[in-house]
Structure formats: C-alpha cells, structure tokens
Image: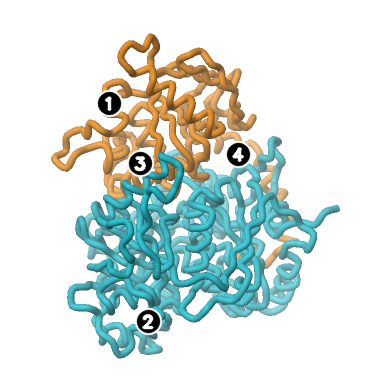
C-alpha cells in the first residue's frame, strides 16, 4: 500500500460515512465560535435543533468588540446586545465561552492553539476563513459558512469533498529579517492567489522544521489567501513542547498516549501528492504587498510593477485597477511610499513572538510624527505576558498605542478603521479594497517590517533599521 | 431550500480574477443588515458612485445585463472570507448560478447550501461564453445575452446554441434538484454518528476533555 499523507491520515479517522464521489460525512472533533458568527446559536434555536456536543465547541469574543484600553462589553453600544445574547445562548447550550477580560479570550485562531483546544490530529472548523491557521499544529482545520455552522452544531459532523493534496517544500534557511510571514507571502507571489484552489496544502522542508510553532501558525493562516482552505504542518517535538501544559491539552498518562499517536501522523516517506511546489528560502528577502490582492507582493527592495509586465490582458486590467486604488505609480521604488497608519495584530501576527519582533525594532526609537501606530495583542494571555516582559512600555515609549485583544483593524468590523485614502502597513492577511475601512489602502508585511515602517514614516526595509 | 432544475435566464460577464467576498458584501453590511435584505448591497464598492447613484460601468448596471440571474466570472471567484452573506447578497440581486474556472472553496460550498449552482468550466470555455454574451449585446446581434442551464443533463447552452457539459458532484446535484436540507438528511444518520464517536472516544480519549 502506498504511503499516506498527514492530511489523509487525519481525514480518514474522521470519516463517519462514505457518501461517494469523494464526499464523506466527517466527524468534527473541534468547533470554534466567535461573535462575528455568533448568530449560529440563535439560528439553530430558531430552526428547532439542539447543540449535539457542547463539550466540543468553544467560543470567544473577537470580531465586534472594542479594542480601546479599558473596554467593556458596552464600549461599542450598537454591538453590546449581540455579545450578551451570544453569552446567554452559549451558557444555555453548555458551551464554554472565554469572555472579555478572562484568560483565554482572544482572536479565535489565537485562542484555540493557546488553550490547547487545537491539537494534532483533530478536525477543527469555525465560521471564519482563517481557521486554516490551526493546521500549524498538525490538524485539518478549515473555515465554513453559516449554514455549515448550523450543521456542525446540530450533528457534530459535516459533508465535505476530499480535496487534492499539495506539498510546498520551503528549502533553505531564512536570512536575518526574513520571517514566516515573508515565506508565505513569497509563496503567494510565486503561485498566485488561486494557486492553491482545490487543495489541502502541507508545508514541509527544512525552513518549516526549523520554524517555531507560532511561525507555522502564521504560515498556515495565509493558506486561504493562496486559495486553499486547508494548510497544515506535520507535528513534531516543537509542536509537543508548545502544547504541553496548556489548559485543554491532555495531561499525565493521556499526554504520553497522545504524543505516541501524534508521532504516527506525519506523511509517510512514500506518500504521493497531486502537486509539489518548492520555494527557495535562501533567496527570500522581506516582502511587502503593493496592490489589492495578496498576490500583489514584491520584495521590499523592489519597484511597483508595470501592468504591462504580465501578458494576460485581464490581469493587466486588474493590475492597473489596483495601482489606481492604491494611488501608486508603476516603476517607483516601493520604499518611497509614505504611510499614515501601522497595525500590528490579527490572527496572522499578534502572538508573543510577533510582538517581540516588533518591539525589537521599536525599542529606543520613535514612531514618525505623521503616523498613527497600533499594537493589538491576539489574546488576553498574550497581552498579560507582553506586559510582564515590559513590551508594552517599549511600544508606548516609542509612540505606539497599546490596545485590548481582538480582530480590530484587520477587518474593521468593530469600527477600528482607517480613513478613505489613508495608507496602512498591516501585519494582517488581506489587502482587499476597503478591508481596513472604505477607501483605505493596505500593505501587508511582517511585524518587524510594520514596526520599521512606523519608525520611518514610509515603507522601509527592516534590515536597514 | 428552493430546488434548482433548469434556468434559462439573462447572463452577465464579470471577467475579473480573484473577486473577493469583501467586495461582494462589505462586512459592515453583513453586520447590520438582515439576511433577506442584503441584495441592494451586493458589490456595493463597485456598484454605486460616491453620490449613491448607479455606477454605469458596473457590469450589472449595464442595460443589457441588468437583472441577470447568471454571473459568468473569472478565476478564483468569491475568494477570501467565509461569509455566507456573499451568497445571500447575490441571491438578493436575483442570481441563481455562477459560472467560473474556479471558486473560493468556502463560497463554493455555501452556494449549494442556498440553492445556488456554482458551475466550474475550463477557462477557455468561460472566456468563450463571456465573449458570446458580450457579442449578443452588440447592435445588430440577433441573439440575447442568455444562457440555458439544465442541471438534470448537466449542460449550459450558449446564445449561439453551443452546448457545454459540466460536472457537478452527484450528492450536490441531488440536493439541488430536490431542494434537500442537509442538516435534516444528516440527522437521519444519528446512529452512525454516535457509533463513530463512541469508537473515537476509545481510540483518542484525550480529545474529549469532559467525555465519558
């Protein structure tokens, strides 16, 4: 029998019934909820269903909450009722909810791994496309729509078609200043925003094995920007060390049993993938997006591309539209681009290692006078740990604002927006038209690059700071 | 769910790649507007001019394509956010089918949950269909920008009468043809779900923190 991939091993152990045509009814071993999709609990009630396994669903608030220092449920008056309703519904259903101010509250894709709710070998879903993040621990994790959320709540299962398998091998060693964010952005630049459509992607290679778990979560987070709803990394000793002692991770004899099982999950040496892609990590330099799709990415030393650099007339049109929206001129070095905002946060880059990276650049320096810069930690625990290390004073002394955990300016649904025409360097995941507020312009980069931009007042090469 | 069998309707081309669901329905509308009322906000950033009037350049505002029930789109249509509101918004405009070379994977599933048919065709076929639709709107053309979709026979018929076959997974086709509710169907498999879970609780007990 040919070897199996990490993906297939986990998929197969969740198949309840084979439905033909590559479709299966899959058991969902973890389900996460957030206040952006919190209507699911009301909808399931309205439709007359009950929550089948409340012990396998975990909830938190992140999308529509204020991130203002000292915030409460009532800080954003129009959304307070939604939070209270979700809290009541979760309680009535027996679902654990990490509430504001409690350890565990945070961006749902930060909370799961941090609490040890996400574990190797689970099949985890959530009504949010960046659920692919959790694959960094060796899980199948993907985003679902509102109706699929109801299906999961009511049946603890989901009907899905088995995707094809792609392996991306990151070979080589990241140079100083090059982070996991740069690796995944470089891949999106290499194969395009549709390059992973229809695939479950496994990230492998020396650069992934050398990478800490938080970096792997960042890499997997951007899988959906590649068109793949699933991204994953094989679990290893780094994974186990990351999880040990976390609140919901197994303990004692169960821990040993779990680790023994997890060691069997990595793809077999002779496992076959439908597509193989290799990325030369040695050649990657810090990346920055210039346009309105994550595939509009260039090295920070580069120039804004000419639409005529591509042959396809439809692509040319898209590039010109992106230039117009972004207010940029083709041929200009991107480092000459002046900025108004810096946002360090989001499920992509708001973990402790991200904040440390940014603080290293910010320490002893000042944010440029015309720039407003925010740091929004990914969770209550990260915020407390960062404060215990004194990172918040580094940021505050440099002129950054230090805020409460939440999604904030990544998707701006809580009103954390930039004004029309303003330009932001953001550590988030989408540079879409209007993503950070109608008319706002977003450049995606790593936390260190974002901090460097804040100091320089323009897009800057972190290696020159 | 409303069954989907045949659809003979006006079709409009939107030949841009990587159209994302943030464009199809902006997040603040999804937050503040009821599901059934999202139609007027579909494609809002492109559809209106700053003064709120219709943008004449927007594909569904062009007289020839206004009221189209079929959208013909390019690569990676509706990528990005998982928001099912993207489907609800285009349904609110009257759209029942989308034809594209590839789709955002979560949007693709969300379509089936709402009786909207996403049809995946080779890009060459999609470009040819789009060209025919544009051609049908030119002065003197003796055809209309319409497509006929037959889910039973899995064919799209273009204005020139060309029939293009498409693949749709059997289980999805069945559900659309009959207008089946997936949750109700799965609930009939409760015994299988319970049996699977009992086995999983024994094999991987650490996954069940409060388990039996």
Disc 4 to disc 2, C-alpha distance = 60 Å
Instruction: State which mark lies toward you, 4 or 2.
Output: 2
Disc 3 to disc 1, C-alpha distance = 18 Å
For residue A280, side relative to residue A39 (left or right): right
The answer to whether marks 1 and 4 sit on the same chain is yes
For mark 2, give the secondary structure.
Answer: helix
The answer to whether marks 4 and 3 sit on the same chain is yes
Residue B68 image position (x, y, % from top left):
36, 24
For mark 3, give the secondary structure.
Answer: helix
Q: Which residue is mark 2?
A: A464
Instruction: State which mark lies toward you, 2 or 3.
Output: 2
Which shade is chain B? orange
Residue A223 image position (x, y, % from top left):
52, 57
Mark 4 and mark 3 lie on one chain; the one further toward the N terminus is 3
For mark 1, give the secondary structure.
Answer: loop
Q: Which residue is mark 4?
A: B187
Instruction: State which mark lies toward you, 1 or 4.
Output: 1
Mark 1 and mark 4 lie on one chain; the one further toward the N terminus is 1
């Amino acid at each position: 029998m040919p070897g199996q991939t990490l993906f297939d091993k986990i998929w197969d152990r969740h198949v309840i019934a084979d439905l033909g045509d590559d479709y299966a009814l899959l058991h969902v071993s973890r389900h996460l909820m957030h206040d952006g999709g919190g209507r699911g609990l009301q909808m399931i009630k309205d439709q007359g269903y009950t929550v089948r396994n409340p012990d396998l669903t975990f909830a938190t608030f992140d999308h529509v909450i204020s991130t203002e220092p000292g915030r409460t449920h009532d800080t954003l008056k129009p959304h307070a009722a939604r939070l209270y309703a979700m809290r009541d519904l979760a309680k009535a259903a027996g679902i654990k909810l990490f509430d504001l101010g409690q350890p565990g509250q945070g961006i749902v894709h930060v909370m799961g791994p941090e609490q040890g709710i996400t574990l190797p070998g689970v099949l985890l879903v959530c009504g949010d496309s960046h659920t692919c993040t959790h694959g960094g621990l060796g899980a199948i994790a993907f985003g679902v729509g509102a109706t699929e959320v109801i299906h999961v709540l009511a049946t603890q299962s989901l009907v899905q078609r088995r995707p094809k398998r792609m392996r991306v091998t990151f070979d080589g060693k990241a140079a100083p200043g090059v982070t996991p964010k740069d690796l995944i952005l470089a891949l999106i630049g290499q194969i395009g925003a549709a390059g992973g459509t229809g695939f479950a992607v496994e990230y492998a290679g020396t650069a992934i094995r050398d990478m800490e778990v938080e970096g792997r979560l960042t890499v997997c987070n951007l899988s959906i920007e590649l068109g793949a709803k699933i991204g994953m990394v094989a679990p290893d000793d780094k994974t186990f060390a990351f999880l040990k002692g976390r609140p919901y991770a197994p303990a004692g004899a169960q821990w040993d049993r779990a680790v023994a099982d997890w060691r069997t999950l990595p793809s077999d040496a002779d496992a076959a993938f439908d597509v193989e892609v290799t990325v030369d990590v040695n050649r990657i330099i810090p990346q920055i997006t210039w346009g309105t799709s994550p595939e509009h990415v260039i090295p920070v030393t580069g120039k804004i591309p000419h639409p005529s650099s591509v042959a396809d007339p439809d692509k040319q049109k898209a590039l010109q539209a992106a230039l117009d929206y972004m207010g940029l001129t083709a041929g200009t070095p991107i480092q000459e681009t002046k900025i108004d905002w810096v946002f360090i946060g989001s499920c992509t880059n708001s973990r402790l290692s991200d904040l440390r990276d940014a603080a290293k650049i910010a320490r002893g320096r000042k944010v440029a006078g015309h720039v407003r810069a925010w740091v929004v930690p990914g969770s209550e625990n990260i915020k407390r740990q960062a404060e215990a290390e004194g990172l918040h004073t580094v940021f505050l002394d440099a002129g950054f604002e230090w805020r409460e955990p939440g999604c904030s300016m990544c998707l701006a649904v809580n009103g954390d927006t930039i004004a029309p025409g303003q330009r932001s360097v953001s550590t988030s995941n989408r540079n879409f038209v209007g993503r950070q507020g109608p008319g706002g312009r977003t450049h995606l980069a790593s936390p260190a690059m974002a901090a460097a931009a804040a100091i320089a007042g323009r897009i800057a090469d972190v290696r020159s700071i | 769910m409303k069954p989907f069998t045949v659809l003979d309707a006006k079709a409009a081309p939107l030949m841009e790649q990587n159209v994302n669901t943030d464009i199809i329905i902006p997040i603040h509308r999804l937050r503040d507007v009821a599901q059934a009322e999202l139609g007027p906000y579909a494609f809002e950033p492109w559809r209106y001019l700053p003064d709120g009037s219709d943008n004449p350049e927007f594909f569904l505002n062009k007289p020839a394509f206004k009221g189209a029930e079929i959208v013909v789109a390019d690569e990676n249509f509706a990528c990005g956010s998982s928001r099912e509101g993207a489907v609800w918004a285009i349904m609110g405009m009257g759209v029942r089918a989308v034809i594209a070379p590839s789709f955002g994977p979560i949007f693709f599933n969300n379509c089936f949950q709402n009786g909207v048919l996403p049809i995946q065709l080779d890009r060459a076929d999609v470009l040819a269909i789009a060209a025919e639709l544009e051609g049908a709107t030119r002065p003197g053309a003796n055809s209309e920008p319409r497509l006929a979709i037959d889910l039973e026979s899995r064919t799209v018929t273009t204005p020139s009468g060309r029939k293009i076959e498409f693949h749709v997974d059997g289980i999805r086709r069945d559900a659309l043809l009959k207008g089946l509710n997936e949750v109700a169907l799965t609930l009939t498999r409760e015994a299988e779900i319970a049996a699977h879970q009992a086995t999983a609780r024994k094999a991987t007990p650490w996954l069940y923190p409060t388990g039996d």
